[in-house]
Image: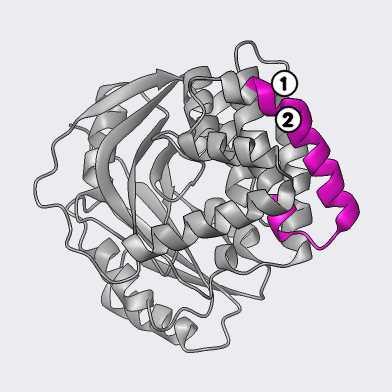
Amino acid sequence: MKNDLISIIVPVYNVENYLKRCLNSIINQTYKNIEIILVDDGSTDNSGNICDDYEKIDNRIRVIHKTNGGLSDARNVGIESANGKYITFIDSDDYIHDEFIHSMYCVLVDNDCQIVSCGMKKFLKPIKRQKNCKTKFKVFNNIDAVEYSLYEKKIDNSVCNKLFNIDLFKEVKFPKGKYFEDLATTYKLFLKSTNIAYLDMNLYYYFQNPTSIIHTNNEKKVEDLYSVSQEMSRNLSQIYNLDKALNARLINIYFYICRESSNELRKKECYKQIKKMRKKVLRDKNSSFKTKVGILSSYFGIKFTNLIFNIYRKVLLCEK
């Protein structure tokens, strides 16, 4: 087995309460040939000092302090500083399994893949990590991987639960100043790859932080999602056999915009698209149950659809 250097990029911004948990999970990886690049994106709390403290105790850690530029900018700065053959991204309020790097690296090298993705476990309170890592995985070609990600089945759009060949980032960068940077970027990386593997183990632990970007709503966020979705549609609409999966993803995005936007014209435009697409998506056997419930409720109007979604979300929260 090779022992290639792997770069781990951790953007850091005002996460002093969670940062040590994240960094401890990284420095305790069973795979040791790693460099850990902490990009302090202008934190105003104690996060920058914590980064400096960890740099002193582990010579694999490098800290970059910069003015605030957002998550995409921090990741891009980390990529430019990376020396590894492979690269992964970890959000600083999350943490990873001890075998996160080793398990995905073995699958990647043994199967000539450019990307490996693993399962992601969401949590509100810290959870016990899986003890025995069984390497159950499947390898996809690039088009099939994009299709799975559009349907949101196993392979998702997050970059944080993935290991990438760093060469993929020579032409692909995260969009600075935009929300939904993963949605805008991951499918482009898939298309530049030949083989993408999915490792069926929850090795990444995603904290449902109520103060994080993903859980805060504003109109710019909604407009960025609309912009990213339209670019994705233009890029993927001409690719053979992706039309059904693309429609399924777009209709879910339009549902989200109809719920969250305060722009009535945008909401009307998205609802118009929902009505145009819903029969096709409803007939698609690969569309999720949640999507089909949303489509059926949309026949009674978007307000009713939003009501059904809110009930569905409350049920899920109760289950957690």
Q: Which image quadrant: the N terminus? A: top left
Q: Give coordinates of residue 68: x percent, y percent.
A: 66, 74
Q: Where in the figure is residue 257, as x and y percent of width and height?
A: 72, 51
Q: Is residue 286 above or below residue 7?
A: above
Q: Residue furthest front?
A: 300
The residue tagged with tag 2: helix, strand or loop?
A: helix
Q: What kind of residue is marked 2?
A: Ser
**Above or below: residue 232 compared with residue 71:** above
Which of the labelled discs sits on residue 237, or is there none? 1
Rendered image quadrant of residue 66: bottom right
Q: Which mark is residue 233?
A: 2
Taking depth in this image into account, of 243 and 174 the one nearest to the observer is 243
Task: Say which residue appears at 29% left-offset and 62% top-offset.
Answer: 26
Q: Residue furthest top?
A: 240
Q: Is residue 255 above or below residue 167?
A: below
Report if residue 309 is visible in the image. Answer: yes
Rendered-image quadrant of the C terminus: bottom left
In the shown orientation, is residue 154 left or right of residue 82?
left
Q: Are marks 1 and 2 in contact (CB under 8 Å)?
A: yes
